[in-house]
Image: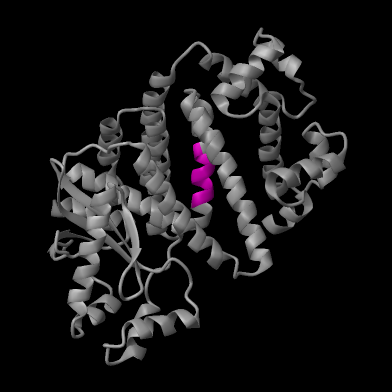
Amino acid sequence: MRHILESLTKATGLRSVIVNTLGEELLAPLGVLEECAFCRTVKRTAGGYEKCRGSYMRAGREAAKFGEPYIFRCHAGLIVWAAPLVISGKYIGAIISGQVLMWEPEEFFWIEVSEMNQNVRDVETLVQKGKELQVISAEKVEATAYLLFVMANHLMKMGIEASEQRREMAEQQARLGAEIFKRKMLEQTLKEVKKEEAQSKADLNIEKEFLIRLKIGDRGGMMELLNKMLADMIDRYGGRLQMFRVKILELIALLSRTATEDEIEEEKVLALNVKYMEQIGRSESLEDLCYLMCQVAEEYSTKIYRKRRGKNTETITEVLNYIWQNFNRQLSLEEIAAHVYLSPYYLSHIFKKEVGFTVMESVTKARMEEAKRLLRHSNDNVTKIAKNLGYNDPGHFSKVFKRSEGVMPKKFQEQAL
């Protein structure tokens, strides 16, 4: 059990410990990651340890009550989360992780921390230690909490119970974390906000297309998009192996949720995640992590495709391939329907049902992906790029691009440079 706890700590870069029902620490990783200086200082004060124990006790009970990871702010002001350990319906303890910040703190935050820790003799030193804490996004907090919950269930040989009430609680926690993160992001400059929004939207579009290819069993298209995402991650985090490992875990969490939504047995999802968890924790190179990610995607694709396999799958794959091969010229629904020997009405019906958006919306998405690639990596002007994508009117192309990406193509090109 300690080995698995140490692997989890290595994979996330966050210290995780097991506590009992009273919040008392029972098991901690050895020689991996020490407790942060901020928490050590707080626990050494009069009554400090008891307050920490009380926070863990309450958090573990709340997590067990709702059967979901519980994200909370501890008595000293840090963000922590708990995953319940349950055997035969009885709560026996929890895995605790975190001791981080979810936004870059401002002066008023340290004032608040000082007020919350008045029993510390040297508050100024405590604040300095607090400034050394990790700052991670709400998205990463949610992804790590989710993985912690999966690990807790694995340790106790329990499956994840999917119920409407628990889904609602998970959504509530996600909305809370997202709202906190969004408020802090709004304090940045307008240029940074716009650039981040544009990048997030682009990432989301690729992720949606990736999941569509995954669900319909188009392994070639799925792996092409996965390689795009991995290449982008290498550009951003290539020099930070730990951050790259966290992003890989986030992708696996995304695949896990997709598999669960497609009614893949939760025990199979859990077993597949555990299979790769330790390998990812031991990997010490980008090449190994990318290889493992491709293996995970292949296995999930096989399981989901077998579950969803039906008579429309090959048709949808053929339509998507035809769109990607011909989006640089004028395309109509009638032409695409004729290519797969279906009526436009019937094709529209099955495509929308399987993919989630219309055939012509898929054409636009393909064009926008190619437009972003050209804007980033070529010296062509907007007029030439529009023509190469089948748009005779550059003004119309610019309107479509802004509606899709939230920024005009010329501005996107400037930001990319």
Between residues 15 and 64, which one lies in front from this camera angle?
64
Dominant secondary structure of the residues highlighted in magenta in the image: helix
Residue plotted at (17% across, 75% down): 50
Using the rendered image of the protein, determine whether residue 33 is visible from the camera's viewpoint.
no
Residue plotted at (43% across, 66% down): 102
Residue 316 x, y percent position in the rendering: 57, 19
Asked whether, in this view, residue 279 is left or right of residue 137, the answer is: left
Asked whether, in this view, residue 259 is left or right of residue 266, the answer is: right
Q: Residue furthest top?
A: 341
Q: Is residue 116 above or below residue 209?
A: below
The quadrant of the rendering that contains the C terminus is bottom right
Q: Residue furthest bottom?
A: 121
Q: Is residue 335 above or below residue 176?
A: above
Between residues 73 and 238, which one lies in front from this camera angle?
73
Asked whether, in this view, residue 57 is left or right of residue 331, the answer is: left
Residue plotted at (31% across, 52% down): 69
Residue 225 x, y percent position in the rendering: 54, 36
Q: Is residue 172 above or below residue 193?
A: above
Using the rendered image of the protein, determine whether residue 243 is visible from the camera's viewpoint.
yes
Residue plotted at (77% across, 34% down): 389
Residue 262 x, y percent position in the rendering: 41, 28
Instruction: Tell whether position 227 is magenta.
Output: yes
The quarter of the picture where residue 46 lies is bottom left
Between residues 258 and 88, which one lies in front from this camera angle?
88
Instruction: Tell whether position 406 is magenta.
Output: no
Between residues 50 and 277, which one lies in front from this camera angle?
50
Task: Count all numbered tags in the image, as a single digit.
Answer: 0
| The magenta segment | 226-233
